[in-house]
Amino acid sequence: MPLLLARIDDRLIHGQVVHGWGGPLRPTWIGIVSDSLRADPGRAGLYLFAAPEGARAVALSISEALLPSTLATTEAERAFLLFPGPEEPLRLKEGGFPLHEVNVGGLHHAEGKVQVLPYVYLSPTEREMLLALERLGVRLTAQDLPTNPARRLAPLLGGGA
């Protein structure tokens, strides 16, 4: 089974993911890919506890996410991959992970970021990472909830259609 959802959302597991996406897609496995979260078991535990009913959630470092066993899991399960920012999916793609589409669902306001959509604010570095993902053949969509239409993100970044 193909990966159900690869999503960039700086809040990781929260109501939109659990109910908005989890309800209709019914994941059985959620991998949160973040070196910093993986290195902090206490913080990771809070996110993992919030996984939707019926889904096993794990925190993975980028190197763990690149292991063949992780790819096998994403192919065997109804799987989500969640990323806190664009660096993680970019490093996965550069490492050979077969990411084909990434949903940008929530990168929120912070100093130095520019609003692209009501739920997407980007720093110059994040913008460049997203454009790099597009250049590597990853289709980027912006969509906060599955009930709202997906939008191609590249044109909003100045990176093509």
Image (cartoon, rainbow, N blue to C red):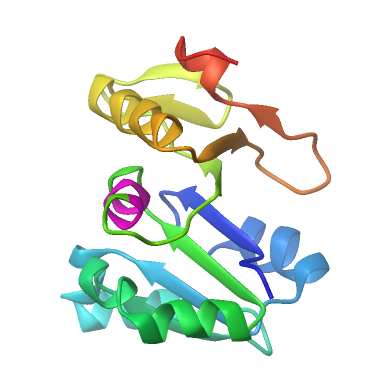
Q: Nearer the viewer, residue 5 or 51?
A: 5
Q: Nearer the viewer, residue 101 or 125?
A: 101
- Check residue 92 for magenta coloring: yes
Percent coordinates x, y for residue 79 in the rendering = 60, 75
From this viewpoint, is residue 69 visible? yes
- Check residue 125 for magenta coloring: no
Q: Nearer the viewer, residue 71 or 42?
A: 71
Quadrant the N terminus occupies: bottom right
User: Which residue occupies 28% across, 50% down?
Assistant: 94
Q: Is residue 76 above or below residue 161?
A: below
Instruction: Count the labels in the image.
Output: 0
Q: Is residue 95 above or below residue 90?
A: below
Q: Is residue 112 above or below residue 102?
A: above
Q: Choose top left, top right, bottom left or bottom right for residue 11.
A: bottom left
User: Which residue occupies 65% across, 42% down?
Assistant: 144
Which residues lie in the magenta part?
88-93
Percent coordinates x, y for residue 95 in the rendering = 27, 58
For the stretch drawn in magenta, the main secondary structure is helix
Q: Is residue 125 left or right of residue 100?
A: left
Quadrant the C terminus occupies: top right
User: Which residue occupies 57% across, 68% down?
Assistant: 80
User: Which residue occupies 20% across, 66% down?
Assistant: 35
